[in-house]
Image (cartoon, coloured by chain):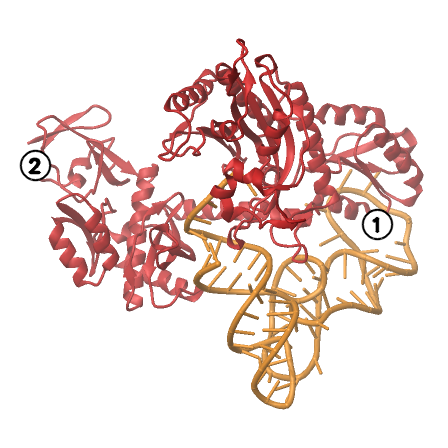
RNA sequence: GCCGGCGUAGCUCAGGGGUAGAGCAACUGAUUCGUAAUCAGUAGGUCGGGGGUUCGAUUCCCCCCGCCGGCUCCA
C-alpha cells in the first residue's frame, strides 16, 4: 500500500501500481475528469502512469488541470505530437526536430523536402482532426539510452539521435501514439481525443537549434486550448491586437509613414504623429530639467576613431552603417550617443563636487538592422533615444540608481502604463571591470529594486559585457509586454576614454557611468503608445483635442469664434464647416478619435454654448465655451500625477 | 541576412497571355441638414523596379526593392 496525500491534506492509501486515474477518482480535490496530468511530489506525470512508493513517505499528488499553465502546456505539447504524427502520415521523407509548447501555443520543427504551403496547413489540420477523433492513447515508456539511439537511427531520425547523444541520463523516455513514436520527456494527455480545441496558426523557417549556421527547418505553429470557447477568446485577442496594430492606425490616423523611396526602416513623422512626439518631448524635457539633468545636443556623425575607442566598432560593427570618407578621414553616422556625452564631460576638469553629472539628450542614432528584422516603428534603422548618461563617484551609485528607477516608473506611468516586468541582468562570462565593482553594481541595482518593493526576475549572465543592467518591459492594456526602458551600469567607457575627476584629496579618480533610456526610443515608444491606446490618445497627447462641428452654414461664424477662443487657450482645436450632415461630420471625427466633438447649431449659438460629444459616444449637456475650457484643461495632463 | 507569403487607383481589395475593375476617399454640382455615411456626376493606374520568353506580358520565368509572418538580433 502507498499512502497518498492530496493538496487539501486528505490522506488515502492505494495499492502500489494503480494508475493516477484511480488515485484521483472519487477524490474531491482530484476531480479526475478535469485533470489532464498529475504532479507527484512536484514532478509532472501522466495520468496513465502508475503510483509507486519510492520514499516511504506519503506521496504528494496534485491534479493538473487545463486551468493551469502547466495543464495547458501538457495539452499543447500533446497537440504538437499529434501534428507531428499528421505530418509524418501525410509526407514522406520528413524528419522530426523539436516540438515544444510555447507561450500561447506550440510548434514543431520539421526537416522537409519542400516548405509547407498554406494548403499544406489545411491538410495537416484535417489529418490532426482524424487522429484526435481516433483517440489514440499516448503511451509513455522509459528505455535504455542505447536502445533509443538504435530506435531513432533506425527510423532515420537524425535530429533525435543528436538530442539523445547530448542527454546525460542512462535512460530516455519515449512516447507512442498509434504508429508514431517520439522522444519526449512528457507528460502527455491520456489520449489524442483529449485535445478539445486547436488551430494551426502559421508556418515559418527556423534554424535547427536557432543558429544560422545550421540547416533551416520548417516550423509549423499552432495553439490549443481546453475548450472551443477559450480558443475563440484567444483568436479574438489576436484580432484585437490586429485592430490596434500601430502600422494600421498610423496610416488611418495619418500619424507616420515609411516610404520605399526614402529607405526601409526610416520613419516619416506626419503632422499628427509629430504633434504627439512634440508633446512627449516637451514633457520629457521639462521633467528632466526638474530632475536635475542637463539637456545637451550632439552631432549626427563623428570620426570613426571615437567608436574605435569606445569599442563599439569592434563589438557592433555588423550593426553600424559603413564609414564615409571626408577629406581622407573616416566618419560614421552615430549608432550611440555616449561617446559625445563623454567628450562634453571631458571638456573641462571635473571635481567630485560636480558629481553626479547627468547629461540627457534626445539623440537620434542610426543602426544597420538586417532587412528581415524591421518591423513598423518597433524595429527601425533610424531612431531617437531618450538617452542620458550619469557620471558619478562609486559611492553615489546606489542613490543614483534608485533615483533613475523611480524616475523611469514615474515617466512610464504618465503614459498610462501601470504594470511592468522588471529584469535584472547580471555578469556574463565575458566582461570587463573588476569583480568587486560588478558585485557592487549588482548589489546597487538589486538594492534599488528592493527598496521600492518592486518584483523582478534575475537573468543570470545576461548583462552587457561592460556592466549589469535593469530592463523594464511595459505591459499594455491588453497584457502584451514591450521592452523599452533600460538602465545600465558601465565600468568600461570611463576606462576606455580615460574619464576622470578629482576626489576630495585632489587625486585622480575614475567615475562610474550609468546609461539609461526610459522610453527606449521615441519611435518604439510611440508605436507602443498607439497600440496601448488603440489610437485614442488621452487629451494631453491627442493631436487634435476638440473639433467644432456646425449643423448648418448659418453657424459658421459662431463656430469660428469658438475655435478661436479654444486656440487662444492653447487647446488644439479644429473646425469642420464643410457642407455635410452632422452625422457625417461626427462619424469622421469619431474615426479620427478626436476626444471632444463640439456640436454647434442654432440652439447653441443662441445661448453662446457648445454641445460636447465625447469620443466614446457619450454626449454632455450644452455648456458655455468657458466651462468646456475648464473641463478640457482639467483633463489635459499626464496620468502619472506629480513626481515627488 | 535566411525560410515562406505578398506588392493592381490615396485606402481596402477583385481580375488575369490580347495593354484593367469595385467600394471608400478626391474633385464638381445639387442639398442647409441635430449626434457614426445625402444624392448625382467627373477624374484618377508605365498593375513595385529591371531584364527575359512571346506576334503580344500587368498575367509566365529570372534578378532587385519593399511589405507581412517567422528564425536570428535588439532601443
Q: Nearer the viewer, residue A636 or A411?
A: A411
Identify the disc placed on residue A16: 2
Please indicate whether residue A154 sits to the left or right of residue A195 in the image: left
Write the residue at 68% across / 29% down.
A296
- Per the rendering, the colour in which chain A appears is red
**Image coords of residue A578 (percent x, y):** 86, 48
The N terminus of chain A: image quadrant = top left
Give the quarter of the image for residue A573: top right
Q: Which residue is mark 1?
A: A580
On the same chain, marks 2 and 1? The answer is: yes
**Element type at mark 1:** loop
Q: Residue at x 72, y 35 (%)?
A: A278
Q: Is residue A479 in view?
A: yes
Residue A54 percent location from the top left of the image: 9, 32
Q: Chain of mark 2?
A: A
| Residue plotted at (9% across, 40% down) | A17
The relative height of residue A99 versus residue A604 in the rendered view (above or below) is below
- Residue B64 in the image: above or below residue A388: below
Q: Position of residue A642 (x, y in %)?
A: 64, 18
Depth order, front residue of A14/A572: A572
Q: Chain of mark 1?
A: A
Which quadrant of the structure image shows residue A606? top right
**Residue A418 seen:** no
Instruction: Report the chain shown in orange.
Output: B
Q: How much space separates mark 2 and mark 1, taking CA atoms?
A: 82 Å
Amino acid at each position: 500500500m502507498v499512502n497518498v496525500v492530496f493538496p487539501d491534506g486528505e490522506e488515502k492509501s492505494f495499492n502500489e501500481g494503480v494508475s493516477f486515474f484511480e488515485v484521483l477518482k472519487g477524490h474531491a480535490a482530484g476531480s479526475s475528469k478535469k485533470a489532464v496530468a498529475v504532479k507527484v511530489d512536484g514532478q509532472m506525470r501522466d495520468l496513465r502512469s502508475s503510483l509507486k512508493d519510492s520514499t516511504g513517505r506519503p506521496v504528494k499528488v496534485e491534479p493538473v488541470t487545463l486551468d493551469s499553465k502547466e495543464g495547458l502546456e501538457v495539452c499543447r505539447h500533446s497537440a504538437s505530437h499529434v501534428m507531428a504524427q499528421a505530418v509524418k502520415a501525410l509526407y514522406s521523407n520528413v524528419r522530426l526536430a523539436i516540438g515544444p509548447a510555447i507561450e500561447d501555443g506550440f510548434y514543431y520543427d520539421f526537416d522537409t523536402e519542400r516548405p509547407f504551403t498554406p494548403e499544406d496547413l489545411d491538410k495537416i489540420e484535417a489529418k490532426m482532426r482524424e487522429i484526435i477523433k481516433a483517440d489514440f492513447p499516448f503511451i509513455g515508456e522509459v528505455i535504455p539510452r542505447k536502445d533509443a539511439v538504435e530506435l531513432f537511427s533506425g527510423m532515420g531520425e537524425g535530429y533525435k539521435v543528436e538530442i539523445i547523444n547530448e542527454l546525460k541520463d542512462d535512460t530516455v523516455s519515449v512516447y507512442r501514439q498509434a504508429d508514431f513514436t517520439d522522444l519526449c520527456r512528457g507528460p502527455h494527455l491520456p489520449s489524442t481525443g483529449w485535445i478539445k480545441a486547436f488551430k494551426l496558426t502559421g508556418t515559418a523557417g527556423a534554424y535547427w537549434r536557432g543558429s544560422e549556421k545550421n540547416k533551416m527547418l520548417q516550423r509549423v505553429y499552432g495553439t490549443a486550448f481546453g475548450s472551443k470557447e477559450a480558443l475563440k477568446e484567444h483568436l479574438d485577442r489576436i484580432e484585437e491586437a490586429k485592430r490596434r496594430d500601430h502600422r494600421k492606425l498610423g496610416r488611418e490616423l495619418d500619424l507616420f509613414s515609411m516610404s520605399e523611396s526614402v529607405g526601409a526602416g526610416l520613419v516619416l513623422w506626419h503632422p499628427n504623429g509629430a504633434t504627439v512626439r512634440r508633446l512627449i518631448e516637451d514633457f520629457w524635457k521639462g521633467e528632466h530639467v526638474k530632475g536635475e539633468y542637463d539637456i545637451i545636443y550632439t552631432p549626427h556623425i563623428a570620426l570613426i576613431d571615437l567608436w574605435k575607442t569606445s569599442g563599439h566598432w569592434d563589438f557592433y560593427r555588423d550593426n553600424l552603417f559603413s564609414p564615409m570618407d571626408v577629406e581622407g578621414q573616416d566618419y560614421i553616422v552615430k549608432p550611440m550617443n555616449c561617446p559625445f556625452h563623454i567628450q562634453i564631460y571631458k571638456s573641462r576638469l571635473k571635481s567630485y563636487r560636480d558629481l553626479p553629472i547627468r547629461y540627457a539628450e534626445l539623440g537620434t542614432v542610426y543602426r544597420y538592422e538586417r532587412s528581415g528584422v524591421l518591423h513598423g516603428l518597433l524595429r527601425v534603422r533610424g531612431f531617437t533615444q531618450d538617452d542620458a548618461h550619469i557620471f558619478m563617484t562609486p559611492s553615489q551609485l546606489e542613490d543614483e540608481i534608485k533615483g533613475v528607477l523611480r524616475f523611469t516608473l514615474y515617466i512610464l506611468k504618465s503614459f498610462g502604463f501601470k504594470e511592468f516586468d522588471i529584469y535584472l541582468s547580471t555578469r556574463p562570462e565575458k566582461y570587463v571591470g573588476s569583480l568587486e565593482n560588478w558585485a557592487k553594481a549588482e548589489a546597487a541595482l538589486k538594492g534599488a529594486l528592493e527598496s521600492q518593493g518592486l518584483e523582478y526576475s534575475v537573468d543570470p549572465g545576461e548583462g552587457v559585457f561592460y556592466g549589469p543592467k535593469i530592463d523594464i518591459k511595459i505591459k499594455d492594456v491588453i497584457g502584451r509586454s514591450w521592452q523599452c526602458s533600460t538602465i545600465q551600469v558601465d565600468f568600461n567607457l570611463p576606462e576606455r576614454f580615460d574619464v576622470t575627476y578629482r576626489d576630495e584629496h585632489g587625486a585622480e579618480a575614475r567615475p562610474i557611468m550609468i546609461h539609461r533610456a526610459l522610453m527606449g526610443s521615441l519611435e518604439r515608444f510611440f508605436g507602443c503608445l498607439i497600440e496601448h491606446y488603440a489610437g485614442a490618445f488621452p487629451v494631453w497627447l491627442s493631436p487634435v483635442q476638440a473639433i467644432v462641428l456646425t449643423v448648418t452654414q448659418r453657424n459658421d461664424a459662431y463656430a469660428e469664434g469658438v475655435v478661436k477662443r479654444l486656440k487662444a487657450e492653447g487647446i488644439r482645436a479644429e473646425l469642420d464647416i464643410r457642407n455635410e450632415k452632422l452625422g457625417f461630420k461626427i462619424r469622421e471625427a469619431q474615426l479620427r478619435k478626436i476626444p471632444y466633438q463640439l456640436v454647434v447649431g442654432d440652439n447653441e449659438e443662441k445661448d453662446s454654448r457648445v454641445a460636447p460629444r465625447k469620443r466614446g459616444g457619450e454626449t454632455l449637456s450644452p455648456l458655455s465655451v468657458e466651462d468646456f475650457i475648464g473641463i478640457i484643461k482639467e483633463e489635459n495632463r499626464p496620468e502619472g500625477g506629480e513626481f515627488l
